Amino acid sequence: SGCNSESRGALVVLEGLDRSGKTSQSSRLLKYLEGLGHSVELWRFPDRSTNVGQMISSYLSNKSQLDDHTIHLLFSANRWEKRSLMETKLKTGTTLIVDRYSYSGVAFSSAKGLGDEWCKAPEIGLLAPDLVLYLDIQPEKAAERGGYGDEKYEQLEFQRKVAQCYQVLHDASWKIVDACQPIEDIEKQLQELVLECIMACQKGKPLANLWS
Ligand code: 2DT
């Protein structure tokens, strides 16, 4: 084991409500792992750089309207179009830190009233994360943090529903971290959890598909 060329990278996902600290903790993790000499990249979904991503971006900024099912499938397609690159990166030893993934997909759409099973179906066969770091914060607390932007879902009432929908999604790959602790404390906890996960992947933990 160790950092040999045959060992794979880890798929680490950060999830949580808007303003839970996912994005800043993701970049802190990236810097930390780079500092240790790991091969690591920071990804995020939606990936707004693709054609599908641009449709999503226009929807989120209220420049276009789409039926709830349609936008759900676009979010999923946006992950499918990155799946093979994701697999290649992981198999060649790069760890991916991913800011939002399929859990956001299911939580946000089921918060609108779409059925859980329907929401999960298009995610079947995407790569399953080795670790999901859920930054846990009450919607009211998140709303106090310098407010939301102007995008579609950034309203307290909707975030409350999303929080409930996230709750039914967690499985063995999830670690729930209290997002109201000092930033440095959260950072330390995430570092430990990610290192442990990277080691398990180096030792041969197999890549799996959703939903496992
Ligand atoms: P950001 O503000 O993090 O860019 O998120 N969303 C995200 C969904 O509804 N479905 C998905 O599959 C994903 C990945 C969450 C943009 C918003 O898009 C929502 C917030």
Image (spheres, rainbow, N blue to C red):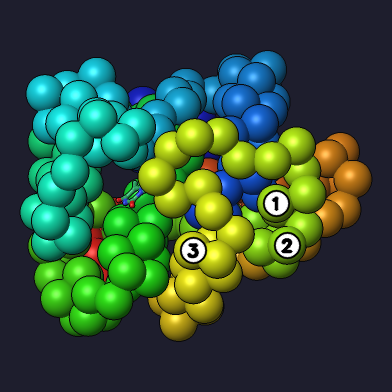
**Residues at discs 2 and 1 in contact (Cβ within 8 Å):** yes
Looking at the rendered structure, the secondary structure element under dot 1 is helix
Point out residue 114 in the picture as x, y percentages from the top left corner. Answer: 23, 75
Point out residue 130 in the picture as x, y percentages from the top left corner. Answer: 43, 56
Front residue (pair 70, 20): 70
Q: Which residue is mark 2?
A: 140
Point out residue 146 in the picture as x, y percentages from the top left corner. Answer: 75, 37
Disc 3: residue Cβ within 8 A of ligand 1's nearest atom: no
Asked if one can make out residue 16 in the rendered structure from this viewpoint, the answer is no
Q: Which residue is mark 1?
A: 143
Asked if one can make out residue 121 in the rendered structure from this viewpoint, the answer is yes
The amino acid beneath tag 3 is Phe
Residue drawn at 52 percent across, 77 percent down: 164
**Residues at discs 3 and 2 in contact (Cβ within 8 Å):** no
Q: Number of callouts in the render?
A: 3
The amino acid beneath tag 2 is Glu
Point out residue 150 in the picture as x, y percentages from the top left corner. Answer: 49, 35
- As measured in the structure, the alpha-carbon distance from the residue carrying label 3 to the one carrying label 1 is 11 Å
Front residue (pair 44, 33): 44
Left or right, 55 with reference to 14 = left
Looking at the rendered structure, the secondary structure element under dot 3 is helix
Disc 1: residue Cβ within 8 A of ligand 1's nearest atom: no
Using a 10 Å C-alpha cutoff, classify the residue at mark 2 as few (fewer than 14 neighbours), some (14 to 19) or many (20 or more): few
